[in-house]
Image (cartoon, helix red, strand yellow):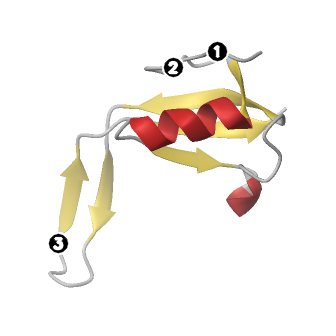
Amino acid sequence: MSKPGLNNLKQGQHYLAKDLDSFVSSTDVVLLSSNDSQIFSDPNREYKVIHEFDGFFEHSSDHGEKYFHEKKAYVVEKV
């Protein structure tokens, strides 16, 4: 289900790993996968967007502070 030139992802939609790879390479987002570091190992593997967030908190070990990042974050799982 290849979608050329992705500029956003939609929750509930399926995408090929190669399309997600291109999307992440050209967009400032965070992509979390239930398939760990194997997400891009098979370009034709299909993933479903299960969650979408407008930002996330991150703890800085340097400063001991928590920071909110206004950056799109998506959770995908292998179909």
8 to 16, vertically: above or below: above
Q: Position of residue 67 (x, y in %)?
A: 19, 59
> Which residue is label 2 attached to?
6
63 to 2, vertically: above or below: below
Mark 2: which secondary structure?
A: loop
55 to 35, vertically: above or below: above
Other residues around mark 3 within 10 Å, as few (<14) / some (14–19) / many (≥20):
few
Type of amino acid under label 2: Leu
Q: CA distance from mark 2 to mark 3?
A: 34 Å
Disc with the residue nearer the chain's start (2 vs 3): 2
> Which residue is label 1 attached to?
3
Disc with the residue nearer the chain's start (1 vs 3): 1
Type of amino acid under label 1: Lys
**Residue 54: quarter of image:** top left
Other residues around mark 1 within 10 Å, as few (<14) / some (14–19) / many (≥20):
few
Q: Please tell me the numbered disc located at residue 65.
A: 3
Mark 3: which secondary structure?
A: loop
Q: CA distance from mark 1 to mark 3?
A: 39 Å
Task: Name the foreground residue: 66 vs 6.
Answer: 6
Cβ atoms under marks 1 and 2 closer than 8 Å:
yes
Q: CA distance from mark 1 to mark 2?
A: 6 Å
Task: Name the foreground residue: 35 vs 67.
Answer: 35
Residue furthest to the bottom in view is: 62
Q: Nearer the viewer, mark 1 or mark 3?
A: 1
Q: Position of residue 25 (x, y in %)?
A: 47, 43
Left or right placement of residue 10 versus residue 45 in this view: left
**Residue drawn at point x = 21 percent, y = 65 percent:** 66
Question: How many badges with numbers are in the image?
Answer: 3
Type of amino acid under label 3: Glu
Q: Please tell me the numbered disc located at residue 55.
A: none
